[in-house]
Amino acid sequence: YLTRRRRIEIAHALCLSERQIK
């Protein structure tokens, strides 16, 4: 349902958002 590339993009976005929160 989610392509590997998409999952990588989402994971990257989550990492960035986590950094901003911290």
Image (cartoon, rainbow, N blue to C red):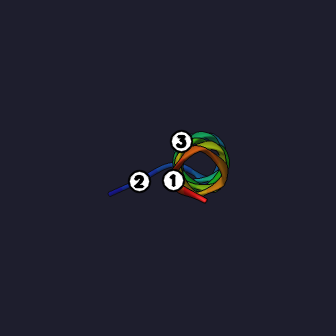
Give me the residue at 32% from left, 57% from top. 1
Q: Nearer the viewer, residue 11 or 20?
A: 20
Give me the residue at 64% from left, 43% from top. 16
**Which residue is the site of mark 2?**
2
* Residue 15, position as x, y percentages in the image: 65, 55
**Which residue is the site of mark 1?**
21
Q: Nearer the viewer, mark 3 or mark 1?
A: 1
* Residue 10, position as x, y percentages in the image: 52, 47
Question: Where residue 5 is drawn, which disc sits there?
Answer: none
In this view, the residue farthest toward the left is: 1
Q: Could you tell me the amino acid type at mark 3?
A: Arg
Q: Nearer the viewer, mark 2 or mark 1?
A: 1
In this view, 13 is above or below 15:
above
Are the residues flagged by discs 3 and 1 in contact, CB closer than 8 Å?
Answer: no
Disc 2 packing (10 Å; few <14; some 14–19; many ≥20): few
In primary-sequence order, the first of circles 3 and 1 is: 3
**Which residue is the site of mark 3?**
6
Q: Could you tell me the amino acid type at mark 1?
A: Ile
Are the residues flagged by discs 2 and 3 in contact, CB closer than 8 Å?
Answer: yes
